[in-house]
Amino acid sequence: MLVIISGPSGSGKGTLVKKLLPENNFALSISMTTRKKRDGEKNGIDYFFCNEKEFVIARDSGKLLEHAQFCGNFYGTPKFYVEQQIKKKKYVVLEIDVIGALQVKEKFDNCILIFLITPDYKELSKRLIERKTDSPETIENRLFRAREEIKLINKYDYLVVNDDIEKSVEKVNCIVKAESLRPKRNLKFIKNF
Ligand code: 5GP
């Protein structure tokens, strides 16, 4: 099962995903990006940072499961890791934007789409300003993108309002547990009868 977490920059996706990992049977996919590394980010842990040429080669040789452009940078999910973890029966978590999420939904039946937001727009804007990782222009672009992404919310299965990170982690865990109990994901037990 693929667990896709989307939501505006600043909604808390990164924190949520890191807190999810010790539980259940999760494996986090690491994306490729042409975005510049932020302070504290590590290559191979937060992203595989690359230049545009390297990204285009990976994309055009079919090595990416999905890809998208976001605020002037390229982002994509390497196929290899996802396929490897699926074979190990892990819940693979993809923290990706809406465009990428819809590409994955087209290709995979077995995915859950979860959208994470802040309680309101003002809070989102506040978080982006306070985290001091982006220029005012980039923040403006990211806020614009957030308003665009939310228009596609009806393509998602779940909406989690992140007003408390621990509760949001619990909600996502509950979603995944409930989804794993769907009959279509338990055919081997049904066949026993
Ligand atoms: P950031 O620059 O804040 O790390 O990420 C910007 C946006 O790109 C976020 O919405 C994030 O979820 C999304 N993103 C990160 N990795 C990928 C990816 O591999 N594919 C797609 N489509 N979006 C991604």
Image: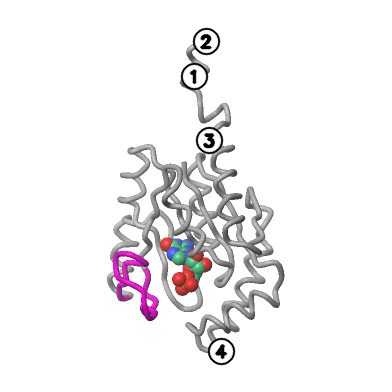
Q: Amino acid at mark 3?
A: Ser
- Counting from the top left corner in percent of width and height, residue 89 is at 38, 37
Using the numbered discs, state the Cα–Cα distance from disc 2 to disc 4 in whole angstroms. Answer: 61 Å
Query: Overall secondary structure of the magenta stretch?
Result: loop
**Marks 3,1: beta carbons within 8 A:** no
Label 3 SS: helix
Residue at the extreme bottom of the image, as rendered: 136
- Counting from the top left corner in percent of width and height, residue 51 is at 30, 76
Q: Which residues are magenta?
A: 33-51
Q: Residue under circle 1?
A: 189
- Counting from the top left corner in percent of width and height, residue 138 is at 53, 84
Q: Amino acid at mark 4?
A: Pro
Q: Amino acid at mark 1?
A: Phe
- Counting from the top left corner in percent of width and height, residue 106 is at 52, 47
Q: Earlier in the sequence, mark 3 or mark 1?
A: 3
Using the numbered discs, state the Cα–Cα distance from disc 4 to disc 1 in whole angstroms. Answer: 54 Å
Q: Earlier in the sequence, mark 3 or mark 4?
A: 4
Q: Residue under circle 3?
A: 180
Label 3 vs label 4, nearer the camera? 3
Disc 1 Cβ-to-ligand 1 distance below 8 Å: no
Label 1 SS: helix
Label 2 SS: loop
Q: Residue under circle 2?
A: 193
Q: Earlier in the sequence, mark 4 or mark 1?
A: 4
- Name the disc covering residue 136, or none: 4
Please give the name of the residue rendered at 48% of the width and 51% of the height, measured from the top-left corner. Answer: 104
